[in-house]
Amino acid sequence: MMQTITFIGNGHMALSIAKGLKGKYHIEVVGREREKLDRFESDLDTNIDKHLLNDFDITGKTIILCVKPANTESVGKTLRGKARLLLSVLAGTSLETLKNHIESEATVRTMPNLAAGVGASITTMTGDRRYQKEAQVLMEAIGETLWLSSEKEIDIATALAGSGPAYLALIAEALTDGAVKQGLKREDAMAVMRGLFHGFGTLIQEIHPALLKDSVMSPGGTTAAGYSALEKGGVRSSCMEAVEKAYERAAVL
């Protein structure tokens, strides 16, 4: 008999995780509107148990919480009982806040990123170490996982991995615009940029960024000329400050 995983919330992140878990676990989903629950089931393309968020009993359940952070308290008030394990994907929502509003024997914070939708997230986690292995197995449904030792570290990682896709998207768009400015057709520039990011994603798994940079920077060459322009523009310091500001914001939230 399959273990049941209970999703509270039926948004995009819940669907991404459920797609990775279906077939291995029985899925049940709790939400506010029957129509959205039906759409979730259709998008998941498998039969699930559907429940309205109204005095729902969580006793003994393994829960993945996928609601908006601001709704943590209101959602908690609609639940009764004590869960076995609570995994939260809520950005900036502390373990203390989760424990204050939702009763559970164990609580784990997780922070997936946008790539969860294609099964390639890097999900950082922290919380009750007794359930570390189980929590990581569940979240590996959407990619790689990394267990961290503190909530401060998960907030920093959120600033890097959680917000990072937006930073990389900006760089991808800017580099593409640069190629178009020099005369390359937009569709060709987009194709080259996508190939660049795809190949880079593989290379960076094996090679340190500094070594990768050095390997393509010939003396007096094209890369050196372009790299110098990036340094003059303060790209390095701006990236470091972006992580700092995002971390500060995550800590406030």
Image (tube, grey):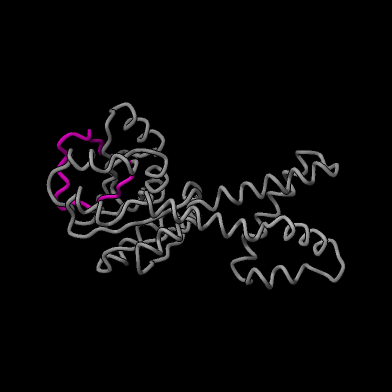
Residue occupying image coordinates x 47% and y 51%: 113
How far across and down, in percent of the image, does residue 167 sit? 59, 50
211 part of magenta stretch: no
Observer-nearest of 72 and 83: 72
Task: Tell me where the magenta segment starts and ends, as one range.
Answer: 49-67
- Indicate the position of residue 173 as horizontal and vertical percent values: 68, 44
Q: Is residue 63 left or right of residue 113?
A: left
| Residue 7 horizontal side relative to residue 174, left or right | left
Residue at the left extreme? 81
Q: Quick one: 138 or 26, which is closer to the camera?
A: 138
Q: Is residue 184 above or below residue 137?
A: above
Q: Position of residue 21 (x, y in %)?
A: 36, 51
Total marks placed? 0
Q: Is residue 251 left or right of residue 233?
A: left
How far across and down, in percent of the image, does residue 192 sit?
Answer: 74, 49
The answer to whether residue 231 is left or right of residue 135 is right
Residue at the top extreme of this rendering: 35
Query: Which residue does the image show at 29% across and 39% down from the upper left?
Result: 71
Q: Which residue is depicted at the point 43% across and 51% down?
A: 249
* 65 within the magenta span: yes
Looking at this view, is 54 or 141 the one in front?
A: 54
When asked about the image quadrant of residue 240, the answer is: bottom right
Q: Residue at x 33, y 57 (%)?
A: 109
Q: In the image, is residue 116 above or below residue 50?
A: below
